[in-house]
Amino acid sequence: MPTLQEIASCVSGYDPNALPVAQAQAFIGRLVSGVAATERLPIRSALGRVLAGDIVSPINVPAHDNSAMDGYALRGSDLLVDAPTALDVVGTGFAGDARPGEVLAGQCLRIMTGAVMPAGLDTVVPQEFVTATEGKVSIPPGVVRPGDNRRLAGEDLAVGEAALRDGRVLRPADIGLLASLGQPEVAVRRRLRVAFFSTGDELRSVGEPLAEGCVYDSNRYTLWAMLQRLNVEVLDMGVVRDEPAALEAAFRHAAESADAVITSGGVSVGEADHTRHIMARLGDVLFWRIAMRPGRPMAIGRIESGGRAAILFGLPGNPVAVMVTFYAFVRDALLQMAGATHEPLPMLRAASVKPLRKKPGRTEYQRGIVSRAADGSWQVAITGSQGSGILRSMSEANGLVVLHHEQGDVAAGEAVDVLPFDGLI
């Protein structure tokens, strides 16, 4: 296993004291690897889990040519171009019936949606276009073309075709797709185990009395909620006081119990605590000053205890910085560790309502409210004060305005990238 310095040597222009966001992301991508263990689950228990291996269709879906709507099945060659087409009705086909008998030229079959198409028939005329009399129908010219309203066998999936690829995070449509293939169970990777705790003598947990100079710990609750979106096993280890013995015990327990460990607080240079020292003593850990706002200080590495190792993410202590660094770095890393195929979060382009000040040379994440302008286009307004301790600004926002590393000031009306919160937080 390469050391962190060896990984860092592969990142062009690596500077731990002024590390661009993209380089930090590249480093983390090289550091983490996916879990190997798998299990089989009933498909109703597999939503949000990571698929272990390709799913290859054992059948054609649909199994037969069938009707896409209620109407009359016929040969397209029987349709007249410049006059009504008269055909004899020789029966009715319902969904679930076996393939009906032969239907000859000049004949048609009354057919329901999903019913199997008889051999030789290739077109369905919707019933609303047809004039029906006793045993016969008349079809006006031009209402359908040969081949219309017929679903072909295997047009959704053919035998031997890959239906779902290894590493996919299973979504509701995927569960339905597995059911359409007759699959009662599916192989998935085991859930990632993530331990997290906050550090600091000033922190109190919800429900405890709040002494003077103390604050309630919100970071564990936002971390817990963000982790829930990733469908991982979580181990909330509470608030750990800034005492060497307590910190070492917490880190050792976390390393022995989880695949990844997330802490908040204690990673800034010069902080009057022992967190950085304990992190470094228990493993191979780097301390970064990332060229971003908010969220400049961060620790990354591996810690070990009792023969077990875990990836460490040491996040800043300010509430907004915790959330921003989680979405910038930790989320994708945890998905990669879970074995999921990487899918970058989609960005929305929106016009900035007001000018934005921005220094080139760092990435800034500003909290914004995206809405529709009068002409129907997207626009975004900043929520107000952007201090990294103002958690209310994240609650009020519905997206993060991402001002990239080389980007400078933004004029009113200029388009910016926005990371929508919908489905994310």
Image (spheres, helix red, strand yellow):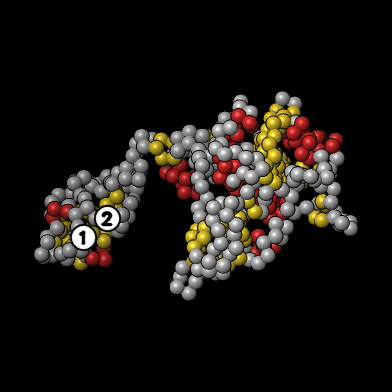
Quick check: marks 2 and 1 in contact, CB under 8 Å? yes
**In this image, 212 relative to 158: left or right?**
right
In this view, 106 is above or below 138? above
For badge 1, the amino acid type reads Val
- Tag 1, which secondary structure? loop
For badge 2, the amino acid type reads Asn
In this view, 44 is above or below 39? below
On residue 149, the disc is 2
Q: Name which of mark 2 and mark 1 comes first in the sequence.
A: 1
- How many numbered marks does the figure carry? 2
- Find residue 188 and report its horizontal and vertical position in percent: 54, 36
Residue sitting at x 51%, y 60%: 416
For mark 1, what is the residue?
A: 144
Residue found farthest to the left: 82
- Kindly tell me whether residue 152 is visible in this rendering: yes
- Find residue 262 and report its horizontal and vertical position in percent: 70, 42
Residue found farthest to the bottom: 374
Residue sitting at x 77%, y 42%: 237
**In this image, 96 relative to 380: left or right?**
left
* Residue nearest the viewer, comparing 284 with 373: 284
- Tag 2, which secondary structure? loop
Label 2 CA crowd tier, 10 Å (few <14, some 14–19, many 20+): many
